[in-house]
Amino acid sequence: MATHPAPRVVADPSAGRAFQRGVNLIVDAVRPTLGPTHRLVAVERNARVDPPEMLVSAGVIARRIIAIGALIHRKWPPESTTP
């Protein structure tokens, strides 16, 4: 049985800043739903033909944002088109 090397974790300051920016984006999107007065947040659907979803749950909004990020990550880098 072949052994694989253990993955390395690299602590780079720019990676920490990028992670913090991502967390801040999610917090800014969820913030209107928290507190004594709950407000709606409109989340655009993947197919832009349908109207946006109107959400009040912070957990659902965060899951939608993370799912979109995972979709982008799976498709990155874009496949090159060679003639």
Image (cartoon, rainbow, N blue to C red):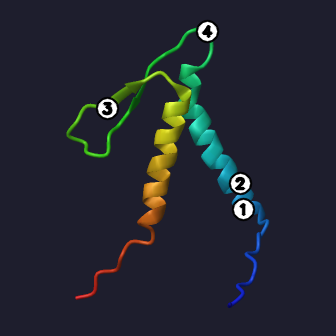
Q: Which residue corresponds to mark 2?
A: 17
- Tell me the element at label 3: loop
For image coordinates 55% across by 31% down, the residue present is 59
How far apart, in angstroms, are the residues tagged by discs 4 and 1? Answer: 36 Å
Residue, disc 1 = 14
Q: What residue type is labelled 1?
A: Ser
Image-quadrant location for residue 30: top right
Q: Is mark 4 on a helix, strand or loop?
A: loop
Give the CA distance from mark 2 to mark 4: 31 Å
- Mark 4 belongs to which amino acid? Pro
Residue closer to the observer: 52 or 3: 3
Q: Do the residues labelled 4 and 1 touch (CB within 8 Å)?
A: no
In-front residue for pair 59/65: 59
The residue depicted at 22 percent of the width and 36 percent of the height is 50
* Residue 52 coordinates in the image, percent (x, y): 31, 31
- Which residue is label 3 attached to? 52
**Along the horizontal axis of the image, is 37 left or right of 11?**
left
Callout 2 amino acid: Arg
Residue contact at pointers 2 and 3, CB within 8 angstroms: no
Could you give the CA–CA distance between mark 3 and mark 1, rounded to whole angstroms? 34 Å
Which of the 4 image quadrants contains residue 37? top right
**Residue tagged by mark 4?**
36
Please tell me which residue is depicted at 77% across the width and 66% down the height of the picture: 12
Secondary structure of residue under mark 2: helix
Question: Is the residue under label 2 in contact with that under label 1 (CB below 8 Å)?
Answer: yes
